[in-house]
Amino acid sequence: MGTLYVVATPIGNLADLSPRALEVLRSCDLILAEDTRYSKRLLQHYDIHVPLVSYHKFNERSRAAEVLQRLVSEEIKVALISDAGTPCISDPGTEIVRRARELGIPVYGVSGPSAVATAISVSGLPAREFTFLGFLPRKEGELKEVFRSIRERRLSTFVVYESPRRIHHLARALLAEFPQALVCFCCELTKKHERAYWGPIAEVVRQLEADPNAGYGEYTVVVHVEHDPPAATAAPGTGELSLEARLVQVMVERGCSLKEAVAAVAREQGVPRREVYQAALRLRSLVAGKEEEG
């Protein structure tokens, strides 16, 4: 069996290619590239002389079959790269990786640059949990559906890609749907003219409209939304129980721990987990006080 490497490449600054990525690319027998014309610049910069073939969404199935056959019969080493960043994230590659796994071919990741991770790291927005949505739909109806899903799923921080010619449209759409959002519009990450438009979405819309260069460069956009808490729904037969009382009820009825009860109450009553956690702290303090009195 051969070996398939999934190699992250620079998202702008060529100096960001890791030593391990450079070693792998130089030692491979074949490199699969999303756009060979674009990737040739990287290979020429590092004086890499390895056969380069295209691997994109229009030939993904046929090229995967061809390369997989060579991986099995010739035991070659193949590197998969995208135009920029880590392959298989809004880029071709999943097909050949999945089929290689099915055939038992070793697949190794060579970590490195990622526009999503870089944007999150410089955004200053909460990112303990976040959702990557890729490129949003262009049709208004489909875009509205995505925004509706974001509200229903209560996604607090999400990341999207956008092209420069549609960046104003995205900003105005976000303002209309999430006027309370904090955003960071990262453009040309790691490149010479890297810039970011940061702040409340209304302010960022003004920044973009005032900047004549806003229509140049690729964007990675981080959005943080504080959703309004849903109305708490009392469980059948419980009346208007306090969170503390509901926690006790769940622990007694289900024989679970306080930690498990916190998760259950937050999930079933649609209350933010931090609110239920605070109620659990109050309950624990109350119990400790009663024990001291006893």
Image: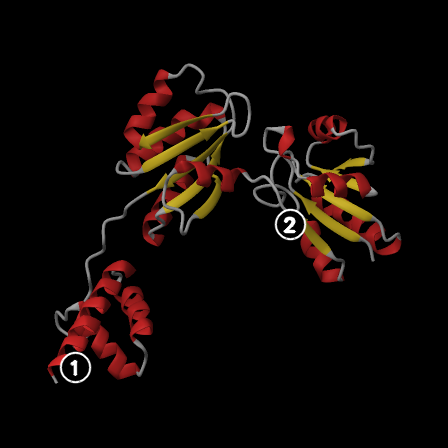
Using the rendered image of the protein, determine whether residue 235 is visible from the camera's viewpoint. Answer: no
**Relative to 278, residue 225 above or below:** above
Q: Residue at x 18, y 77 (%)?
A: 287
The C terminus is located in which quarter?
Answer: bottom left
Q: Residue at x 88, y 55 (%)?
A: 73
36 or 124: which is nearer to us?
124
Q: Is 200 positioned to the left or the right of 67 in the image?
A: left
- The residue to which callout 1 is attached is 291
Residue at horizontal 71%, vertical 56%? 99
Q: Residue at x 41, y 37 (%)?
A: 123
Image location (x, y in percent) of residue 265: 27, 68
Q: Position of residue 163 (x, y in %)?
A: 50, 28
Element type at mark 2? helix
Furthest residue toward top? 212
Foreground of the two, 2 or 279? 279
**Mark 1: amino acid:** Glu
As drawn, the label of residue 94 is 2
Q: Nearer the viewer, mark 2 or mark 1?
A: 1
Secondary structure of the residue carrying numbered label 1: helix
In-front residue for pair 173/184: 184
User: Residue 184, position in %: x, y?
Assistant: 39, 33
Q: Hey, what amino acid is under mark 2?
A: Thr
Measure the alpha-carbon separation of dots 2 and 1.
Answer: 57 Å
The vertical placement of 237 against 263, above or below, is below
